[in-house]
Image (spheres, rainbow, N blue to C red):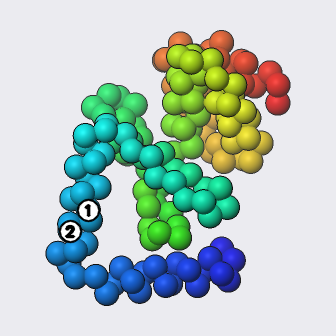
Amino acid sequence: MSESETALLKMQREIFARMTPSRRLEIAANLHATARALKASWLRTQHRGFRADCYLPGKSEIARWELTYRRRLETLFGDCWFSPPESVVLHKLLFYREGKSDKHLEDIRAMLASGSIQDLNLLTDWISAQHLENEWKLACDER
């Protein structure tokens, strides 16, 4: 994290710490209600083009796996929980199968190139279980 990012994170934490517990609870309740109403909410920040998609967990086998293997990382907004990268790839393959947007394949290629996928065997097991072999082949072919 850069010096300016560290300073911004410190400032945000100080502001949050000054909020009353009831205000923090109100903010959390509003976020929860909005997410429940929409089933998925999009949180965006323009800082370096960072964007995170936030989804409520479902009751599927995939959702249980995602919750079990989620990762806690420090961000500019405080500690956040993230799905494993393998899950992101799996969902991008599902989205590609539905809409055929090449953006999902490009994102997968970037993730593979970055080395963020830690368990390729687990990922290929999920790909097989979801019958996404053709979509996976397309993502891997143009690497």
Query: How many discs appear?
Result: 2
Question: Which image quarter: residue 124?
Answer: top right
Can I make out residue 83 in this image?
no
Which residue type does callout 2 highlight? Leu
Question: Which image quarter: residue 59?
Answer: top left
Residue sitting at x 57%, y 30%: 92
- Badge 1 local density, few (<14 within 10 Å), some, or many (20+)? few
The reply to whether discs 2 and 1 touch (Cβ–Cβ < 8 Å) is yes
User: Residue 142 vs residue 131: left or right?
Assistant: right
Q: Position of residue 19 (x, y in %)?
A: 28, 82
Q: CA distance from mark 2 to mark 1?
A: 5 Å
SS class, disc 2: helix
- Disc 2: which residue: 25
User: Residue 124 vs residue 64: left or right?
Assistant: right
Front-lying residue, 23 or 96: 23
- Disc 1: which residue: 28
